[in-house]
Image (cartoon, rainbow, N blue to C red):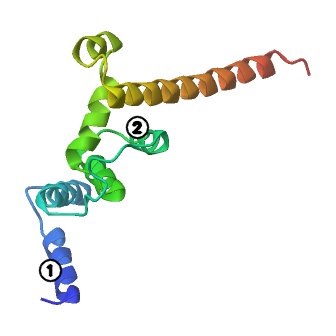
Amino acid sequence: MTKTEFREAVRSLLSQGVAELSLDEKTAIVRQCLVDIQEYEAFDESNKGNSWTDEELKVVLLHAPTKENCMLLARAFRRGYGSIEQIFRWAATSDPEVAAKRPDDAFVQQIKRVANRLVGGLLDRYLSRSAEASYSALALP
């Protein structure tokens, strides 16, 4: 099958009526199938096991923790899919639970530090914008 034939076959499949699904719903199913296929396909994991930089962790944590994003980030950083999931999981874990389960794990501590800085920075920006809006509302004409 050529690339053009493949593209036409996909378009034909998506144009068929399927149990009253909208095009958006069909597209979501196709995306999920692509993620499922990619999850089991071999891809470059040449950075697997290497240390993460704070900036790399920040990029990961700025994404929503979805399967699609885990796959996208694993491929982009040439890491294992599970490593991305682990970053999201530890970032969302409470500090007392981290202290109980992994008190001396440097990687988990790095994830928590970056996540807390990220949340703190976003919160600071939000609060400063809210304060600016409040001050401007008080300004006299």
Q: What residue does disc 1 label?
A: 9
Label 1, secondary structure: give it. Answer: helix
Q: x, y percentage for residue 44?
A: 25, 63
Badge 2 crowding class, 10 Å Cα cut-off, few under 14, some 14 to 19, many 20 or more, is some
Three-letter code for the amino acid on which mark 2 is drawn: Leu
C-alpha gap between disc 2 and disc 1: 37 Å
**First in sequence: mark 2 or mark 1?**
1
Judge depth for marks 2 and 1 and give the one in front. 2
| 33 to the left or right of 141 | left
Viewer-side residue, 67 vs 105:
105
Q: Quadrant of residue 43?
A: bottom left
Viewer-side residue, 139 vs 56:
56
How many marks can you see?
2
Q: Which quarter shows the C terminus?
A: top right
Q: Quadrant of residue 101?
A: top left
Badge 1 crowding class, 10 Å Cα cut-off, few under 14, some 14 to 19, many 20 or more, is few
Q: x, y percentage for residue 48?
A: 27, 51
Q: x, y percentage for residue 90?
A: 30, 27
| 121 to the left or right of 39 | right
Tell me: residue 108, above or below residue 38: above
Q: Residue furthest right?
A: 141
Q: What residue does disc 2 label?
A: 61
Three-letter code for the amino acid on which mark 1 is drawn: Ala
- Residue at figure coordinates x 22%, y 58% from the top left: 31
Q: Quadrant of residue 27?
A: bottom left
Q: x, y percentage for residue 12?
A: 16, 77
Viewer-side residue, 5 vs 77:
77
| 114 to the left or right of 24 | right
- Residue at figure coordinates x 41%, y 29% from the top left: 110
Tell me: residue 47, above or below residue 6: above
Q: Are marks 2 and 1 in contact (CB under 8 Å)?
A: no
